[in-house]
């Protein structure tokens, strides 16, 4: 199939940005939450989450290999997209470069 014959990108009604936008190419991880993200989060909003989550990982010193670190990351992800939003850590000071 040539590029011009490929089917258009899947669109989702993005829960974060409130508009229909291109979806992620696949679920970002396994399980019900991964499927929920795939079905309702745009690729653009996912990139925003990844930037936000870098700050969380650094500020909270999360070890994503550990079960505890993964649980916190997933809880913050759920808040970011489906809750009241993921808050900045209390001690977080924004850099001029951010």
Image: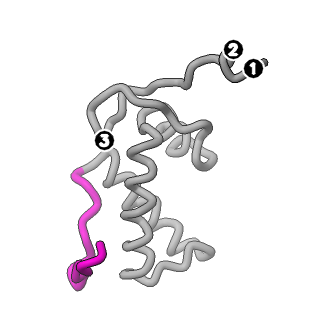
Q: Circle 3: is it few (<14), some (14-19), or many (20+) Cα within 10 Å?
A: some
Residue 85 is one of the magenta-drawn residues: yes
Mark in the foreground, 3 or 1: 1
Q: Is residue 68 above or below residue 37?
A: below
Report how far apart the C-alphas of labels 3 and 1 lie in the structure.
Answer: 33 Å
Q: SS of the residue at dot 1?
A: loop
Residue 54 x/y as whole percent: 44, 70
Q: Circle 1: is it few (<14), some (14-19), or many (20+) Cα within 10 Å?
A: few
Label 3, on which residue? 16
Q: Which residues are magenta?
A: 84-98
First in sequence: mark 3 vs mark 1: 1
Quadrant hosting residue 32: top right
Residue 97 is one of the magenta-drawn residues: yes
Label 1, on which residue? 2
Q: Is residue 47 above or below residue 70?
A: above
Q: Is residue 2 above or below residue 80?
A: above
Label 2 with label 3: CB-CB less than 8 Å: no
Report how far apart the C-alphas of labels 2 and 3 lie in the structure.
Answer: 30 Å
At 34% from the left and 47% from the top, the residue drawn is 81
At 32% from the left and 54% from the top, the residue drawn is 79
Horizontal relation, residue 81 to residue 93: left or right: right
Q: Main secondary structure of the magenta part?
A: loop
Residue 76 x/y as whole percent: 37, 61
Foreground: 10 or 74?
Answer: 10
Residue reaching furthest to the right = 1
Label 2, on which residue? 5
Horizontal relation, residue 93 to residue 63: left or right: left
Horizontal relation, residue 87 to residue 11: left or right: left
Q: SS of the residue at dot 2?
A: helix
First in sequence: mark 2 vs mark 3: 2
Quadrant hosting residue 91: bottom left
């Amino acid at each position: 199939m040539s590029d011009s014959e490929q089917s258009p990108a899947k669109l989702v009604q993005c829960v974060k940005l409130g508009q229909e936008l291109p979806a992620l190419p696949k679920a970002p991880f396994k399980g019900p939450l991964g499927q929920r993200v795939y079905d309702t989060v745009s690729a653009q909003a996912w990139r925003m989450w990844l930037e936000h989550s870098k700050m969380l990982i650094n500020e909270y010193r999360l070890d994503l290999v550990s079960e505890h670190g993964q649980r916190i990351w997933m809880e913050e992800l759920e808040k970011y997209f489906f809750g009241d939003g993921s808050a900045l850590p209390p001690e977080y000071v924004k850099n001029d470069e951010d």
